[in-house]
Amino acid sequence: MELSVKPAGNVVVVEIRGSVDGLTADKLLQTLTEQVQAGHVRLVADCAGLDYTSSAGLRALLGTVKQARQKGGDLRLAAVRAPVLKVLELSGFTSILKYFPDVKDATASFG
Amino acid sequence: MSPDSASRSSGNRRRVAVVIGSGSVKCAASLGLINVLRREGIEIDMLVGCSAGCLYATLIASGRSVAEATDMTRRLWTSEITARRDHKSILRALLPGMMGFDASFGLRDDSLIMERLRAAFSDERIERMQIPLHLAATDFANGNQVVFSSGSVVDAIRASMALPFMFSPWRIGDSLYIDGYMSDPLPVGVAMKEGADIIVAMGFESPYQERINSPGRFAFQVSSILSNNLLKSQFSFHGLAHHAEVIPILPEFRQRIRLFDTEKIPAIIEDGERAAELQLPYLLRLLEAEEQGH
């Protein structure tokens, strides 16, 4: 899994490439947590290059959503590919997370 | 955790479970998953089944080949098993005061499916399978999930496939059991309790009706809505609450699969294989990391 963090106005976009599983989820959670702790609570996860997530990846996303919302922000997903979206739907994540077709829309949703 | 599970988990090797959820004939896709796991030499430490998934979990746990399992399914699972009405049960429903309605209600006579289950599995026992096996059903008295890790294979499969209204609940000892999907359509929690570290979970959503033109279809629609929502909530809870790594395998079927489409089993197995191949790289990486001591 590869991560890159890019500011986009008042939002921080975290691009996730590859797969998030038990071996890589800690790195994702750490990166996202660092952003929240630095006060960047409006986060967009760019999932265009994310090809897989296991339950460990879902736990990392959920942990970040909780932290960001407690501080008045949110984690929103962009460009989620079909196989990953299916896992998110099965896990009920689509009912608690906002997701958008692309990074532009996700970033704009913060207003 | 059962004594057997405890003894098998004594080393540091991460334990792999395969969980096969409810899904009628679509559960044959699990044979495609098994083809892939066997080809890669991935050892399965336990199998968990629910509803029709019990049938396949048992066939795999007993060491039968995919060809044998396919053949047995075709003989066992035909539309004839639901063809005969249970007239006594229907009369009891229509005239409960006169005929005496009770919890053994089911619209279809189960004698043929029992005959076929007995012909297929005879007196096989769950605890004597080659791979530890756990079959999940639902206690009709209180809705709790019940897991059979020992006992008669025929009884446990019949209990877990007791589709409400269609087949009567099944009595084992003093208790009545109904279909496992009523408590958890994809029971990954059973594998977690039994000590699995990596759970390969093949699940299926219940299909929605194209047209609702009979009370039966109406009932199936209601059942699908409930079970699909239950599937999501249970899967979500277990995935988030436990440390185990759950790898969901959700086959995409190239054609609509109806309840008794056993002639489509070869295509269903192919779809299962394709879905398993997609997740295989992650499973292999987890297992490789374990070998390297991560």
Image (cartoon, rainbow, N blue to C red):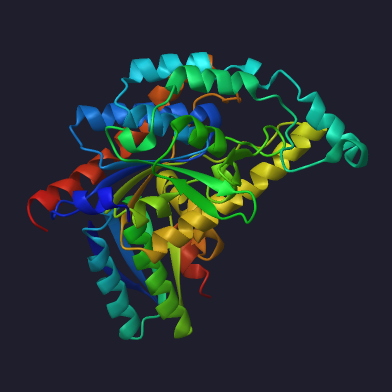
The percent position of residue A4, horizontal first and vertical second, equals 25, 65
> As drawn, which residue projects farthest toward the front?
B173
Residue B212 visible, this orientation: no
Relative to B244, say whether A43 is above or below: below
Q: Residue at x 56, y 18 (%)?
A: B115
Relative to B253, say whether B250 is above or below: below
Q: Residue at x 31, y 33 (%)?
A: B129
Residue A46 quadrant: bottom left
How many labels were placed on the picture? Answer: 0
Split into 4 quadrants, where in the image is the N terminus of chain B?
A: bottom left
The percent position of residue B284, horizontal first and vertical second, equals 20, 42
Q: Tell me: B221 left or right of A2.
A: right
Q: Tell me: B292 left or right of B202.
A: left
Residue B135 visible, this orientation: yes
Q: Toward the viewer: B38 or B115?
A: B115
The percent position of residue A93, horizontal first and vertical second, equals 49, 60
Q: Toward the viewer: B151 or B63?
A: B151
Relative to A110, say whether B229 is above or below: above
The percent position of residue B70, horizontal first and vertical second, equals 41, 18
Relative to B90, say whether B136 is above or below: below
Q: Residue at x 32, y 28 (%)?
A: B62
Split into 4 quadrants, where in the image is the C terminus of chain B?
A: bottom left
Q: Tell me: A26 left or right of B122.
A: left
